[in-house]
Image (spheres, helix red, strand yellow):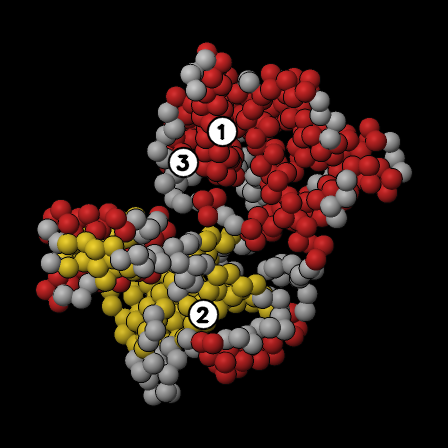
Amino acid sequence: MAETPDNHFDRAEALEISVASRLDDWFVAEVLPLETSLRKFLRRGWRNEADIRDLCQDVYVAVYEAAAREIPTSARAFVFTVARNVVADRVRRAQIVPIEAVADLEALGVTVDEPGPERTAIARQDLRKLQAALERLPQRWREVVVMRKVQGLSLPEIVTRLGIAERTVSQHLTSGIAALANIFHDDPTDQGDKS
Amino acid sequence: MKADDLDAIAAQWIVRREKGEWSAETQSEFDRWLATPGNRIAYLRLTDVWNRAGRLKALSAQRRGRFFSFRGDTFKTAAKVAALFALAAAVGAGGYAWLSRTNDVRYATGIGEREIISLADGSRIELNTQTVLRLASVGGKRIAKLESGQAYFDIKHDPVHPFTVLTNGHKVTDIGTKFEIRTDTNKVQVTLFEGSAQFESDGPSATRQNAILVPGDVAVATAQSMRIVRKPAQKLIAELGWRHGVVIFDHTTLADAAAEFNRYNRKKLVVTDPKVAKLTIGGTFQTTNTQQLTQLARDIFGLTIEDRGTDIVISR
């Protein structure tokens, strides 16, 4: 069959999709599992707890955009290099945090080359982390998350079961999903350097 | 935009998906939203954890005691631990009935697999290929049983809740440590990296030994004897290569290298020619990349590599 321009387009699109999903796969498999370590690392360089999630996001965007050009060989090394720059940048812009906050990053350092639990994390460990995360969720959110994920109920079933507005259930679920990810990636024992 | 606000939108997309209200229009709106890396990342991140949360279904099927939570009946501890050791000694390495009545958790890795267990108390255990480990908390004592294979322990010391590893009847109790235990068919090797640990070997009472290990100590216990040797730091690092998915050889014979590779791979390397077996190699190899070794054997030593499907024969 002769190749029409349409075919070309399809192929180019298919290629783009496969590139995007390869990048996404890499990001999910190699980068996201580092978040617990990343948070620890960021906390040591940046005292304001309220900014940690934002800093993570900044690191992710920079990592993702760089990886779109070329996927780095070591996700871990790359993520922490970017993280160091992101923190240094923040500190520079803030101008209020003494500069030793970053100077000491390395010395305080989260060991970058250590294989984290992330790389080989498996079902059981996930389950334990999830279970702990679930317990730390605010009660209303936890309730709908449990119904959805533990009991496997559909949204309409949850609405019926709870007897509250669908809109409210959706809101609880939305909040629950976002909070679960934050808690899941957070090490409850890590208090950073808040001295 | 604040990441939290981004998360709220990403979570809304997930909920919309789950509701099933999804038209072609929604799809194109979603695609447009996803085209921004920041949005895409937020979505990937939430979806990842939300998908993992599917594992929570397991909770509805089983209700297990909280692991290492250290709550509960401490007064029964002594009796329980005594019974435990008696049981462990009685069943030996087979260990089928071990702790079956307590809340133990079994971890097992297959050929070439590794697993890292992070415990609630901050301790970490890394399992190498073909390893079976059981963990339990009895009273407040943390007890692990290494049934086979190799594991690295990084234990948060707690005098009130000592951490003990049982293996082939031998016993290692941490005193704030990082150590590794490797079991083979007839011996157990304990390598201490940091802190100290107490090692009690099993065997006829005359040969039973009790030693405090310090960093650099390698205790090797067989059914009859135990000896402690010291290893230089470089050797110790090489010992732990598996934690990074590599084996480090230094003047290692091809026979030993093949045996090491065979722990990680289904397809076995076979070296029968004694002259070939004695050739020595060095370097860092990925545990599951047999090809790195066979290529080296072919290119450097000019050996013949024959892939027979289930195994690979290295010969002259």
Q: Is residue B91 above or below residue B1?
A: below
| Mark 3 or mark 1: whose residue is earlier in sequence | 1
Frontmost of labels 1 and 2 is 1
Q: Amino acid at mark 2?
A: Glu
Q: Which mark is drawn over residue B234? A: none
Distance from the alpha carbon under mark 1 to that under mark 2: 41 Å
- Asked whether, in this view, residue B256 is left or right of residue B167, the answer is left
Label 1 chain ID: A
Distance from the alpha carbon under mark 3 to that under mark 1: 20 Å
Q: Amino acid at mark 3?
A: Arg
Q: Position of residue B89 (x, y in %)?
A: 48, 81
Q: Which mark is drawn over residue A76? A: 3
User: What residue sits 35% from the left and 48% below the top?
Assistant: B244
User: What residue sits 34% from the left and 88% below the top?
Assistant: B206
Q: Which mark is drawn over residue A21? A: 1
Q: Are marks 1 and 2 on the same chain?
A: no
- Asked whether, in this view, residue A50 is left or right of residue B179, the answer is right
User: What residue sits 61% from the left and 59% below the top?
Assistant: B67
Q: Position of residue B146 (x, y in %)?
A: 45, 67
Q: Position of residue B32 (x, y in %)?
A: 60, 16
Distance from the alpha carbon under mark 3 to that under mark 2: 32 Å
Q: Are marks 3 and 1 on the same chain?
A: yes
- For label 2, the SS is strand
